[in-house]
Amino acid sequence: MVQAVFTGFFGLAAIWFAVVVFRTSSMVRSALALLFSQAAIGGMFLAMQTEFLGVLQIMMMATEMAIMAIFMVMYMMDPGGLGGMDMTHQKRASQVAGALGALAALAVAFFAGWGPIAPEVRPAEQVYGLGIEIMERSMLIFETAGVTILTAMIAATAIAIKRRGKE
């Protein structure tokens, strides 16, 4: 029961902060709301006793926010992000698309055949299967993505910093 309460709490928090991303008029506030939304999803994973995925989600969001901060400072006219902006375009079309998307998600949730509930959960087998997936066929993809992201971060930092002694 406690697990369901915490999962529901973090789920509602994730949805609330996702809405706040588009309701605020500041890039900084939108970025923080996005961080909190994704951290709440990490909290949902932790509440569902999938610690690896929860910690991975939170760590990925922290890294993503660091990268986004570098690019905000490098490219934006208002790096602090406190100037006013409008995050919504085509308001009527986006409201209709959101309502249709919500109805479709609810229809899938309530009317799809999800199959029988597993009689017992074996976390050790789940972790082992995840480890095999990551270390076997997906290893090259993860390593390539990691090196590419690291290279982009170093390059963005090098471009953003003024050269000293050349002035």
Image (tube, rainbow, N blue to C red):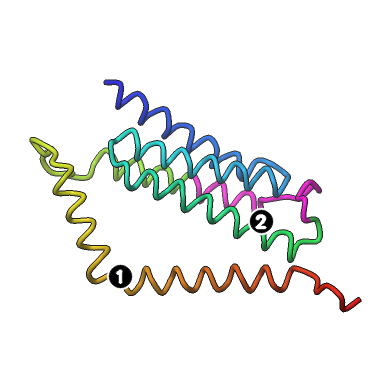
Q: What element carries label 1?
A: helix
Task: Inspect the image, locate mark 1, and give the three-letter code of the amino acid beneath it.
Answer: Met
Q: Which residue lies furthest to the top in this view?
A: 1
Residue 88, placed above or below residue 72: above
Residue stretch rendered in magenta on the structure: 79-98
Q: Residue furthest bottom?
A: 166
Name the quadrant of the N terminus.
top left
Q: In this view, does 160 lie to the left or right of 123?
A: right
Report the Cα–Cα distance between label 1 and label 2.
28 Å
Mark 2 Cα within 10 Å, few/some/many (few <14, many 20+)?
A: some
Residue 69, numbered circle = 2
Residue depicted at 87% across the width and 78% down the height: 166
* On-image quarter of the C terminus: bottom right
Residue 67, given in percent of the width and then of the height, sits at: 60, 60
What residue is at 20 percent from the left and 62 percent from the top? 132
Q: Nearer the viewer, residue 112 or 1?
A: 1
Name the quadrant containing residue 162.
bottom right
Q: Position of residue 149 (x, y in %)?
A: 51, 69
User: Percent from the top left, x then y, of residue 125?
Assistant: 14, 49
Upstream in the sequence, badge 1 or badge 2?
Answer: 2
User: Can you say whether 99 is above or below 77 in the image?
Assistant: above
Residue with the mark numbered 1: 139
